[in-house]
Image: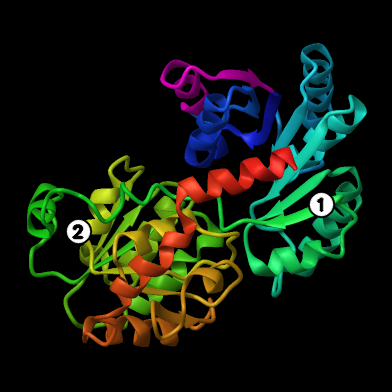
Amino acid sequence: MRILVVCTTDSMIWNFLIPHIKYWQDKGDTVEIACSRTGFYIDELRSKHGFTVHEIPFQRFPFKPKNFTAYKMLKKLVRENRYDAVVSQEPVGGVLGRMAGKKYKCKNIYTAHGFHFFKGAPRLNWMLYYPIEKMMARKTDVLVTINEEDYQRSLKFKAKKKVKIDGIGVDLNRFGHVSASKEELREKLDIPQDAFVILTVAELIPRKNYATALQALSKIKEDYLYVICGEGAQMEQMKTLAGELGISDKVRFMGFCRNVDEFYSASDLFLFPTFQEGLSIALIEAMASGLPVVCSRIRGNTDLIKDGQGGLLFDPKDTDGFTDGVKKMMNGEGSAFGSFNQEYVKTFSIDRSMEEFYKAILS
């Protein structure tokens, strides 16, 4: 097959879809990418991985004028290259990709990495995204969802086929198998040997709810170190908040990290109070690394974490709950949670995910 992968952003490809694209190529398919440029990602996709990437100026907000230009470029690309299938991701890429695919009679596969309308979502999300997704489902041959809540909602849509896979997968061999010991990793990463290390791996954006994490930790008097791997628009704001809460000396902002596997293995707990997820890759990585978890009780997280077995779950706004949960972990109440997570997470391996998704494309 000739497959075009359409994503709103190049970072989506770089962070999540490289193994899938290589898997399809190994099957003998020709795979090309259409996405916007948000950083170094397009250059690396081309130079390091040898992918054919078509730069199209998609905008994340649906009604930006540049999306009309992007759609014209995408239509021209699909018309000239005669793809057999268009595999779309993200809301804007999903809409424009399916419109172009339908116009030129390609097979339309759409992956919902987490509908923007979900239980507890703002009313504006429901007003804006729900009608669009419901309408676009009629142009969809295969609608792929990655968590139970989205799958159940998708059953009401008119896509020809609806399937659920267990996420887009994680290379479980990379996580939990770092050759160095925890002590060696802490020395390498300049982390105190005797500290209780709490880790979050996520963008610094409002959706990840860092404010609640910092407020919860500010109430803990015991010794700990909170390590944040990620960058984003709220970096300076969260640094300021940590200072206002008097915990700047207990929080480290590491920025973008390529060696997150080492940080997982050097830590004691994964903290994840996020407001919205589809099925978090970072959470799966933490589980594969054998970490207990304190996280928000939301769609996606509840697919992964069994409350009282792999972690403790709280409402995203329950600051006191997160404080209490972290304290319990520091006192050793979740000593068996990490082992449980490492066994449970095997369902979400990259190999299984790629096979399931490829079957969905061929179905």
Horizontal relation, residue 214 to residue 124: left or right: left
**Which residue sits furthest top?**
80
Q: Secondary structure at mark 2?
A: helix
Q: Which mark is residue 266?
A: 2
Looking at the image, which is closer to me, 118 or 88?
88
Q: Is residue 184 visible?
A: yes
Q: Is residue 108 magenta?
A: no
Please tell me which residue is depicted at 48% across the width and 17% down the height of the picture.
50
Residue 181: x %, y % from top left: 10, 55
- Identify whether 113 is placed above or below 299: above
- Identify whether 206 is placed above or below 260: below
Q: Secondary structure at mark 1?
A: strand
Residue 278: x %, y % from top left: 60, 59
Horizontal relation, residue 193 to residue 122: left or right: left
Mark 1 nearby-residue class (10 Å; few <14, some 14–19, many ≥20) = some
**Quadrant holding the N terminus:** top right
Q: Are marks 1 and 2 in contact (CB under 8 Å)?
A: no
In the image, what residue type sits under mark 1? Answer: Lys
**Quadrant holding the C terminus:** top right
Magenta segment range?
40-56
Q: In which image quadrant can residue 290 be found?
A: bottom left
Name the residue carrying label 1: 161
In the image, what residue type sits under mark 2? Answer: Ala
Residue 230: x %, y % from top left: 39, 49
Looking at the image, which is closer to me, 343 or 286?
343
Looking at the image, which is closer to me, 118 or 304?
304
As measured in the structure, the alpha-carbon distance from the residue carrying label 1 to the one carrying label 2 is 43 Å
Horizontal relation, residue 53 to residue 284: left or right: right
Mark 2 nearby-residue class (10 Å; few <14, some 14–19, many ≥20) = many
Please tell me which residue is depicted at 51% across the width and 55% down the height of the picture.
205
Residue 233: x %, y % from top left: 49, 48
Colour scheme of the picture: rainbow
